[in-house]
Image (cartoon, rainbow, N blue to C red):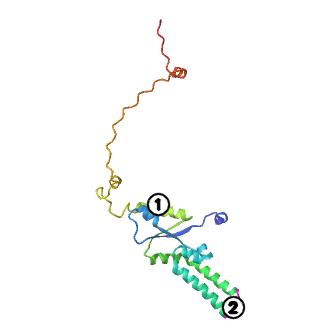
């Protein structure tokens, strides 16, 4: 928002899109399982690297961060360096984590067999997802697996051991309502010509 106010334009964001090794047969299920990884500096990974890595299941990076911080504290304490030294070294480690978080996440996905199926640029995560799906969904097949036949797929009635009931006979249409007796009925009834006496 500040960029838009200062320069009159909104900064674009870029994402890489990844698909799991064995995607679902239905394209809607495939679309829901896609992973969007933002390019650039990740501020949450800069603030709390171990939490950011652990939340994504990147346990090797979490252990590496903890080992590096432990080594920094041990070495600076053993050398008797001033207390600001380990803080600056840990800050540098946080900067590296924030700058390389996207590449670490992509490497983690590739190691698990995920494939990169595209890149997209937009004004934000929702705009990027909409742009990607606008182009990807029409090109994706409706289903990649065989469709079950009617004989192979039991109906819900046969699973419940119920027999289908014959349709109910058609009911005759209701008779037209008679005018209600009384004053209101007389007011609403059409006027009838009087018979001469």
Q: Is residue 21 above or below residue 80?
A: above
Secondary structure, magenta segment, majority class:
loop
- 27 vs 80: above or below: above
Q: Does 96 sit left or right of 108 as displayed?
A: right
Point out which mark residue 134 bears.
1
Residue 21 in magenta stretch: no
Q: Residue at x 39, y 70 (%)?
A: 22
Sequence order check, earlier mark of 1 and 2: 2
- Foreground residue among 179 and 53: 179
Q: Quadrant of residue 84?
A: bottom right
154 lies above or below 14 = above
- Taking the image as shown, residue 148 lies to the left or right of residue 186, namely left
Among the 4 quarters of the image, the one containing residue 73: bottom right
Local secondary structure at mark 2? loop
Q: Residue at x 56, y 68 (%)?
A: 13
Where's the N terminus, which quadrant?
bottom right
Q: Is residue 189 above or below residue 101?
A: above
* In-image side of 144 versus 182 (left or right): left
Q: Nearer the viewer, mark 1 or mark 2?
A: 2
The residue where tag 2 is placed is 81
Circles 1 and 2, Cβ within 8 Å, touching? The answer is: no
Number of residues whose C-alpha sits closer than 10 Å to that of mark 2, classed few (under 14), some (14–19) or many (20 or more): few
Image location (x, y in percent) of residue 63: 55, 82
Q: Residue furthest toward the front? A: 161
Mark 1 crowdedness (10 Å alpha carbons): few <14, some 14-19, many ≥20: few
Q: Residue furthest bottom?
A: 79
Magenta extent: 79-83
The Cα–Cα distance between marks 1 and 2, rounded to whole angstroms, is 57 Å
Q: Nearer the viewer, residue 10 or 23?
A: 23
């Amino acid at each position: 928002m500040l960029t838009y106010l200062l320069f009159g334009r909104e900064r674009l964001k870029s994402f890489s899109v990844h698909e799991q090794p064995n995607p679902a047969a239905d394209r809607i299920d495939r679309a829901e399982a896609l992973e969007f990884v933002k390019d650039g500096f990740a501020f949450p990974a800069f603030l709390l690297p171990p939490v950011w890595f652990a939340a994504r299941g990147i346990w090797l990076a979490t252990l590496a961060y903890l080992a590096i911080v432990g080594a920094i504290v041990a070495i600076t304490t053993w050398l008797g360096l001033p207390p600001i030294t380990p803080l600056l070294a840990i800050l540098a480690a946080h900067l590296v984590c924030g700058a390389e978080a996207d590449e670490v996440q992509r490497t983690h996905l590739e190691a698990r067999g995920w494939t990169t199926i595209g890149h997209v640029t937009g004004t934000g995560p929702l705009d990027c997802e909409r742009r990607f799906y606008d182009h990807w969904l029409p090109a994706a097949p409706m289903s990649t697996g065989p469709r079950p036949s009617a004989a192979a797929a039991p109906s819900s009635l046969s699973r419940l051991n119920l027999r289908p009931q014959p349709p109910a006979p058609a009911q005759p249409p209701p008779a037209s309502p008679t005018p209600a007796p009384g004053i209101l009925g007389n007011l609403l009834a059409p006027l009838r010509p009087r018979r001469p006496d």
